């Protein structure tokens, strides 16, 4: 169960009950990747994606390649960006009408503007969601990585981390798994979209704590490629070495602005 590529027609099962619904955005050189999790006749979608028809139609088609969408009872949005949350009201037309929408507490104030039917249920660090035959998700907050209301979702059953933007990267093909070029692709992406080294360090250490407590077998970001278990230590190390917020330093040098050093 370790396929190498995906297409525009079918979801790919990357762990028991976990399906990759990726859409390659060739214009912007990245993949937009929602995930479907199915357990005991009940389903969850994590980060359903863009409202652009060329994205949403692919995601819906892939969901239908696996299940009847009406068994989707939960939708999780890990932060507020439209590339992962704008499709929520579109998805509503096909899923359980009494579904629940979840997001970080601080993201709720923005996610309500997508006009989803239910009020978002706010989540805090350590909260859980139990569904299906007892499958359990644990939510870990990763504030300011890259929004104050950001989080990751951990699946206890398969030891999978859905990492949102963390570990995302710019990619130009339909590869599923991180290869030899992915450290550069990840560094370019995170260097652009993360502004706080302190926030990045916290997020990495929070994942390391999850690994110590429960173990991590794969990291599944919302963009780019997934990271298999054997490569996780190298990517954690790459994250710790990453410099972020470079555009601030560039503009500061341009205007002769001296910035205070922070720990």
Image (cartoon, rainbow, N blue to C red):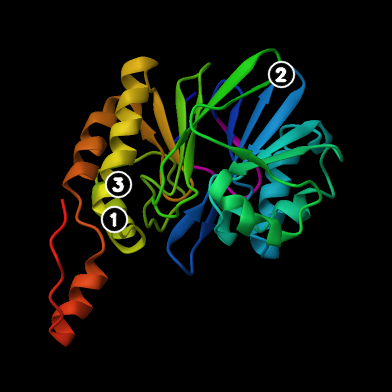
Percent of width and height locating residue 220: 45, 37
Element type where label 1 sits in the image: loop
What residue is shown with label 3? 200
Instruction: Left or right? Give the position of 32 relative to 204.
Output: right
Kindly identify the residue that appears in the image at 29 percent across and 31 percent down. Answer: 232
**Mark 1 or 2 closer to N-term?**
2
> Separation of disc 3 and disc 1 at Cα?
6 Å
Percent of width and height locating residue 38: 67, 26
Q: Residues within 10 Å of mark 3 (few under 14, many from 20)?
A: many
Task: Return the mark for residue 80.
Answer: none
Kindly identify the residue that appears in the image at 39 percent across and 52 percent down. Answer: 144
Q: Give the extent of the magenta segment.
A: 5-13
User: Which is the main secondary structure of the residues drawn in magenta?
Assistant: loop
Q: How many marks?
A: 3
Q: Residues within 10 Å of mark 2 (few under 14, many from 20)?
A: some
Task: Return the mark for residue 132.
Answer: 2
Q: Say if 163 sits above or below 215 in the image.
A: below
Q: Kindly indicate whether the residue at mark 1 contacts the one at mark 3 (C-beta within 8 angstroms).
A: yes
What residue is shown with label 1? 196
Q: Is residue 98 magenta?
A: no
Element type where label 2 sits in the image: loop
**Mark 2 or 3 closer to N-term?**
2
Instruction: Tell me the mark number nearer the camera, choosing from 1 and 2.
Output: 1
In-front residue for pair 17/209:
209
> Separation of disc 2 and disc 3 at Cα?
33 Å
Q: Say if 36 sits above or below 120 in the image.
A: above
């Amino acid at each position: 169960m370790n396929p190498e590529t995906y297409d525009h027609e079918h979801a790919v099962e990357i762990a028991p009950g976990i399906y990759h619904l990726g859409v390659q955005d060739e214009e912007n050189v990245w993949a937009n990747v929602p995930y479907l999790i199915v357990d005991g006749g009940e389903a969850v979608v994590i980060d359903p994606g863009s409202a652009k028809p060329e994205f949403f139609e692919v995601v819906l088609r892939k969901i239908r390649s696996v299940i009847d969408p009406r068994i989707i009872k939960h939708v999780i949005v890990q932060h507020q960006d439209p590339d992962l949350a704008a499709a929520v009201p579109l998805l509503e037309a096909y899923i359980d009408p009494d579904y629940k929408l979840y997001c970080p507490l601080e993201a709720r104030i923005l996610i309500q503007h997508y006009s989803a039917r239910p009020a978002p249920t706010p989540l805090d660090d350590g909260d859980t969601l139990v569904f299906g035959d007892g499958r359990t998700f644990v939510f870990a907050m990763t504030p300011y990585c890259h929004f104050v209301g950001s989080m990751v979702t951990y699946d206890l059953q398969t030891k999978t981390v859905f990492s949102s933007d963390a570990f995302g990267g710019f990619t130009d093909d339909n590869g599923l798994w991180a290869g030899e070029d992915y450290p550069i692709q990840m560094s370019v992406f995170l260097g652009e979209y993360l502004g706080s080294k302190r926030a990045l360090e916290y997020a990495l250490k929070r994942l390391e704590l999850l690994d110590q407590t429960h173990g991590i077998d794969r990291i599944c970001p919302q963009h780019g490629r997934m990271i298999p278990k054997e490569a996780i230590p190298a990517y954690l190390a790459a994250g710790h070495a990453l410099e972020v917020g470079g555009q601030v330093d560039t503009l500061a040098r341009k205007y002769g602005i001296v910035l205070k050093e922070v720990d």
